[in-house]
Every structure is written in structure tokens, then in C-alpha cells.
Amino acid sequence: MKKTVLVTGCDGYIGFPLCLKLVKDGHFVVGVDNFSRRENVKSMGSDSAIKIHSPQERTEILKSLGNYSFHNYSVDSPFTTNTIFKTYTKPFDTVINLAQQPSAPWSHKSHFHTLSTINNNVNGVINLLYAIKKFAPNAHLIHIGTMGEYDPTVNVPIPEGFFRFIRKFRLSNKSLFPRRPGSFYHACYDKDTEILTEKRGWVHFKDLTPKDKVATLDIHKDELVFQQPTNTFEYDYQGEMISITNRSVDLLITPNHRVFEYSNYTAPITRWRLTEAQDIYGKCRTMKRGVSNWEGVREDFILPSTIQRTGLYGTKTMPPIKIPILKWAKFFGWYITEGHCYKNSVVISQDAIENHEDIINCLKSLDRKPQTSRINLPDGTKKIKGFSIKHRQLTEYLKQFGLSGDKFIPSFLKNQPKDVLQVLLDTAIKGDGHNSPDRTNTAYYSKSYRLASDIQEIAIKCGYTATIGPNGDCYVVSITKNKTGKTQFITSPAHKTSHKLYNKVPYTGKVYCCEVPNSVILVRRNGKHVWSGNSKVASTYYIDLACRTWGLRATDIMQGIVFGAWTRESDDHNTHTRLDIDEAFGTVLNRFILQAYFQQPLTIFGSGDHQRGFLSLYDSIQCLNIALLNPPKESEYRTWNQLFLTLTMNQVADIVVDAAEYFGHNPDIKYIPSPRTEHTNEHYYNPETKILKSLGYIPNCDTKEAIRDEIWHIFDILKVHPPDANLINVIQNPQIKWR
């Protein structure tokens, strides 16, 4: 039966030959790729050792063979993923997800690389699951994982996904090996928690929109950065929540939610970690509230043009006026706290004599002559009440910022650089606040909760911490010049107040969260802000849960190390797949082949006795085809181990050396310390591989001799198409360290 198949990652090592196979077999194939694999390999200073066609040429080849369509999209965006599914009137029968960042070393290269890997791999799966649920609920999801998800030294046979165990003489139900989550909402906030957005200030999670960017923490720079959420979450929850409260922090979160904390109050922020809330009970911990750096966007203010009446019937257009941003920040600080508009005049009211000169100079900077207002006192003297300027164009603009309880500061001004915000904050405090004698603590008062929230946001960006609380008929923003921007709390059972700081409380209702590349977000509850974690969970968990809860069907493939470059279709049409050899994307056997080709030592990590499972590219394609033709039942999540030969690294190197000698290459073998945190000595390794064989599959390459033939094939290609000699620089000792 011919199927409509979506292949994400269609330009990859496996994706392109798979598309060749499917199109040739008569299926309608829709390919999706953003070519990140090409860019990532280039960033390693490398390229495919076998020259490959351009994306445009590949698309033309596939279209010439059958029914094929291509989209240059990424699946880590819900919008683009949904667009792909909505483009086709006939729902997809099968979705094959190969849009993974497949390199473990790449994910260890830096903090950024770790986050981008999680963002790509996890969010892509989530977006596909939601799109399948909405647009193609009967589709079969085929997802390729890796045998690396299992501990290769677990010392028992590794089952195909599920296992049972005996605990205190009781046999368990079937469980995922070695983990299985209970829910999506394992890491969320309650309905009263807010998050800081770039344009709209503080909003509740339920009110987040796809256009919002939210405040995140770049821990390497200790900098507030706004990022687009890659996912938002909203679920019904009934159970225990953890409440963490003190004078500075107020959190109500699910037990597995990650908080950003560290035990050492003065430790560098890069050493801090995200820890599940349930794991900090009984410990003294520090949470981060402030941030050292905020960049902002410097831009002078443009007072909009207006149309003004002249005479009885005439009008004239008043052109825009450019005002230097520091002058505007000072003026707006006075206006938003002490100002109002009356007819065509802007009025600043202020009793404090020490501020009068500052206000006069501020108004003069707008090229207007200030007028002084006075009131008569009972003793016959006069007292200055305030100052005003006539400026119709200015009053037309300022009226939008409301009166008293409705005032606010526009996002344009709140997103200026730190020095501009400091001028605005200092001026606002002169109007409606006061400083402690040592100027380490400041209070700002406002009847407008929105304005108080804006002042809090500005204070945070200036490097302070700030808490909002009620104060009579208004709100007070308590601003602290905290050198570390952190707060310490104790959850020890022995501490007499610990029960007030860390509680487990029942909760029934909605819970919320979002996912961002930086992993740490700025949240607020009851006026108290703190940096905290966002939601993360592994792809396997999501797929299993979606099948159990939504009735979807999926095959989750735990695949061994793929090697080789041959498939029947690629040979028939003289178009090769990529062959990467760098330390991030070059799998061990392919990397050994190029080391041998360039007469370089084959670098083996540790003692070389650690075992891994292997299969050829041809076998990988055939297995995926079997999965496509044999879908699981509705609500069934199945997983199988896709490998057919288990070898030690020493055995792999010996096979490559033997094959290379046939072509006149005589490489040495060199043992080097492993850059990874892995076991490199002899160990028990026995993954089960029953399911594919039960479906009638016979491996094409499951002996050492067959592997040798695959290696010879690559040498034949390299003989005709020699690789770039500069690639010798990327096959030396690895530079990415996992420790």
C-alpha cells in the first residue's frame, strides 16, 4: 500500500537515502529540513568526506524519481510544524522523525550547544506529537533514538524498550527500561505565577502568546535576555505542590520542578544548577533574584506628529520631534510620578524644594519656558505647587498613560540600556519614593499596580532586587541594592521556621510553564521575583505518554552506530549520502576509515574493550521501511533495538586496518585517554534484537566480512572522488572534553 510519508531531517546521513528508497517504492514523500547538519559540520571546520549534491540538486533528483515535495523548515517551532501538516489535505500516514541533533560530543561542546541540542531534539518531538494529534491522529510516528539512551554497562541483557522486575516478591507491570514518567506536567507553576515579557511586562503564564518573548538568564554573562519560548504548557493537575516562601521568594510548583540554586552563597553563577524542588528539602540553599547585566536597545525618543487646529477651520501638521533619550527618560520619570495633562499643558506637581531646579531644567530641555504655579498659605505667603509648560503635541502623546491608578511606562522606554533606566528610576524615586540613609534600600509608592510592576522591572534591569507589596491604599516597591542579587533560605527540618519556608500543599487546578533555550526564566508570585527553571523532559517520555493518553501510535527505535555509505538506490542514481569524520558528527567506524585513508593512527579511547552495537546504512534504511509497512495498533508505543553486530573498539579498528591494507594503506593504532565520561574496559553488553527478526527481517551486514565489504566500498568512492586534504586536520585527537 502506497503511503503519504513525512520525513523530517530529509537532508541528513540517513534521511536522504531513506527518501530515495521511499520515493522509488512509490510513496508520496514530503521532506523537511533546515540544513543545520551542514552548518554544524562546517562549524567544526569539517565537511563530508564524500562530496554530496546541494539541497536544490537533491530535491530535483527526488522529484525526478517520483512524488516528492520539500519544505525548508525547522520542527522546533510549533507554527512551522503545524504549517507543514495543514499544507496537505490528505493527512500523513507515517511521520518519520530524523530531525535530531545526533551528536553526543556536540552537545557537550558548551552550555549553548547543550541547550540547542535539547531545544532541537525535545521540542521537535513535542511539536510533532501535537501536530499529529490535531491533524493526523491515525498517523504512525517513527522516531529514531539511540542505544546510547541505555547504560551499556548495565550488566544485564538490555530489553527492547520494556521490562518487568521483581520487588519484594512481587512481579511488576511492564515498564520502560529503565524509566517511565507519570505525566507531562512534571515541572510547572501554579495559576498565580507570572513571567516577565519583553513588550507586555509581567503576565500570567495562561496569557502568554506566540508573539511574546520572555526574560531568561544567560548564566555565562549573568545577563537578562529575552527569548521566544519554544513551547508553552498548560495542564490540569491534582496533587501535592511545593511551596517555597520567604520575604523575597514565593513559589508554588510541582515537586519535580527545577529551581535554580546553589549551596554556596558566593559561588560563581556558572556553578549553579537546576535542582528538583523535592530534592532540596532539609538543605540550606540560595536562590538568585537579581541579574548583573542588561543590554537593552538605545534609541532616541520620537514625539509623534499631530494635526492641530489653526483658526476656525484650518489645521496644520506638527512634525515629529526627536528628543535625546536621556532627556526624555528624566522628563518621563517626573511626569509618570508627579505629572498630569491639563488642556494643552503638561503639569509637574512637587512640594520638595530640593527638586524644583531639577524639574525646571528638565522642562527647559524640551524647548519650553516653564510656568510656576503657587498657592496662598494661611499666613499670607505663597508656596510653589508645581511647574507647567504649554505643549499640545506633548499632551496628545502623554494622555495615553492614564491618571493615578492607571499609569504605566511603555515598553520602548523599559527596554532602553541600563544608564537610561537608571536616570528614569532615580527620577521616579525623587517623585514618589525615598532612600534609606545609606541608599542601599529604596521604597517607591504608586496607586497603579501596573506602574509599580514597571518600576520593579526597571529596577531588576538596573541590577537591583525589588518586591511589590500593599501599603494602605497604594503599592510599595521595596528596592534593594543587593550585591549578589541572591536570597538564602533554609529547608532543614531542624530549623524552627523551616515549616514556613518549605511546605507541601494540596492543589487542584491548572499548572503552567514554558520552555526556553536558556533554561532559566524570571518568574513572579505575589510581587516577589526569582530566577527559576523551565520545563524539560526526554523525547521517549513524551512519545510514550502521548500514546497512552491520546491514543497515538509510535515506533521508537533505539539504533546502534550506523556506518557505510551504500544503498542500492544511491548507487542506481549515482548520488551519495554524506560521510562525516569530525569528532562531533563522525561515527567511530567512518572516522577510523578516513584516519586510515590519510595514513593517520586510528585513535582508540581508553583500552578499547568497550562494546557497542553496529549496523550498516543499508540495514538502517531497510529497518525503517519495515517499521513503515508494519505500523503498531492504536495507543501502542513500541520500541525496538536496531543493531545486528556487537563489537569492541579494538575489533572495529582491526577490521578497518585489514580493509585498508587491501588499498595499500597501513595505519597504526593509537590509544588515547577518553575525552568522554565512559567505561572503556571489558564489560557485559547484550542488547536484545527480537522484534525486527520476528517481522521477517534478515540483516544484510551482520558479519565482520560484510563490514569489510562496506569499508571497501567507501575506499572505492574516495579513490574516484578524493576528499579534501584539509580534512586531515579534523581527524586528530579530540578537543571536546566531557569532564
Image (cartoon, rainbow, N blue to C red):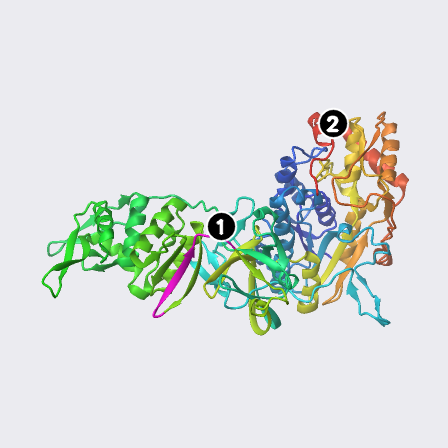
Q: Which residues are magenta?
A: 472-486
**Residue 252, horizontal then vertical, whole percent:** 55, 67
In-image side of 28 versus 429 (left or right): right
**Residue 403 in which image quadrant:** bottom left
Local packing at callout 2 (Cα closer than 10 Å; few below 14, some 14-19, many 20+) is some
**Residue 91, horizontal then vertical, whole percent:** 63, 60
Q: State the mark number for residue 179.
A: none
Q: Which residue is mark 2?
A: 722
How far apart, in angstroms, are the residues tagged by discs 2 and 1? 53 Å
Q: Quadrant of the N terminus?
A: bottom right
**Residue 395, horizontal then vertical, whole percent:** 23, 55
For the residue pair 86 and 693, the one nearer the viewer reads as 693
Magenta stretch encompasses residue 586: no
Q: Quadrant of the C terminus?
A: top right
In-image side of 24 versus 448 (left or right): right
In-image side of 74 versus 729 (left or right): left
Magenta stretch encompasses residue 485: yes
For the residue pair 335 and 246, the one nearer the viewer reads as 246
Kind of element beneath mark 2: loop
Q: Which residue is mark 1?
A: 291
